[in-house]
Amino acid sequence: MNDLRSLLPAELAARAHGAGEPAYRGEQVFRWLHARGIEQLDQMTNVPRALREALERDAPLAPLAMDAVQEALDGTRKLRFRTRDGRAIESVLIPDEKADRDKLTLCVSSQVGCALDCAFCATATLGFGRHLEAGEIVQQVYQATRLAGRRPTNLVFMGMGEPMHNFDNMARALALLQHPWGAAFSPRRITVSTVGMVPGIQKLAALSPAPNLAISLNATTDEVRDRLMPVNRRWPIAVLLEAARKFPLAHGRRVTFEYVLLAGVNDTDADADRLPRLLRGIPTKVNLIPWNPFVNERAPFARPSAERIRTFQERLRAGGLPVYIRTPRGDDIDAACGQLAAREPLVRVRV
């Protein structure tokens, strides 16, 4: 690990010991990095200069540079960052739709681009750039906190990339974010979404404590899902749902299934009747996501009509599923679900 923010407390303690300092210095450094979110090592006023210099030589800070912010009409803000090697990634700050609630959700990216090639997603058009390191993942949270003036209440790993494809860095980021010396997020406030990488779901289930799980399902037959999501050819629906059934759930928690509605593709009455049967036996809720268009000739889809969406929801409810329609947030700035592609923004950050 060459990124200081990616190191866990025990690893920082070992670095401190190697520099001739007592192990408790590791806790001090961790608190500066993850509780206070500092940007420069010389801000660690109670850490000896010699240790700061040793850490800088061995594992220098690799800060993300926030180079743009766009604000949508609904208050959603899209943040564009540059990594140290010049790659662009995006996060999205989403305030609650109801003004009387104090919820603020941050949608976090785990990769530069994505390798999974889902046909309806703008990020897939970028191809795969690289995995984000754990330190780059958590920095999205700390920088968004500074911008918003308060910490997000909820984190969702639903931004650019497939979290399970970058499992080791994602799991390390979870450990950093949940540590009581740092941001101390509750796992109940963190959701990890996957397109259906079954080994990743199994490894996520083994974490203690495990975060919430969301699965991007989007079809009720393998034939349709194969076309929309190539990952299904390796882990078809039956295999994916078996992994979901085995996922450990604390009292009151459910697996979320996300279902992007595509007109004439996966929104038929037959689909609505099949879905409750497929999910039977899984504590679940379903989020219906009307497809968010993006500029790309490879995506010949359309959003279903409002009437079709309501009918689909009603049939799912009749089948016994708790189901909700996700109102697009930030779609006027390409910040809604499936739209992140790090395009040139309209509004730049003032320096």
Image (spheres, grey):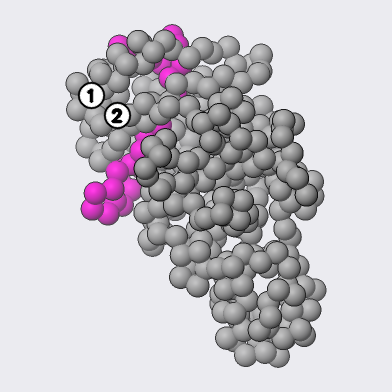
Q: Amino acid at mark 1?
A: Arg
SS for callout 1:
helix
Asked whether, in this view, residue 92 is left or right of residue 247, the answer is right
Q: Amino acid at mark 2?
A: Val
Label 2 crowd (10 A; few <14 / some 14-19 / many >=20): many
Vertical side of 347 occupied by 111: above or below: below
| Residue hosting label 2 | 323
Q: Which residues are magenta?
A: 243-269
| Residue hosting label 1 | 317
* Quadrant assignment, res 343: top right
Asked whether, in this view, residue 132 is left or right of residue 213, the answer is right
Vertical side of 5 occupied by 87: above or below: above
SS for callout 2:
strand
Camera-nearest residue between 223 and 283: 283
Question: Is residue 144 magenta-colored?
Answer: no
Q: Is residue 266 visible?
A: yes
Point out which mark residue 326 bears: none
Question: Is residue 259 magenta-colored?
Answer: yes
Vertical side of 308 occupied by 129: above or below: below
Residue at the limit of the structure toward the front, as seen here: 100
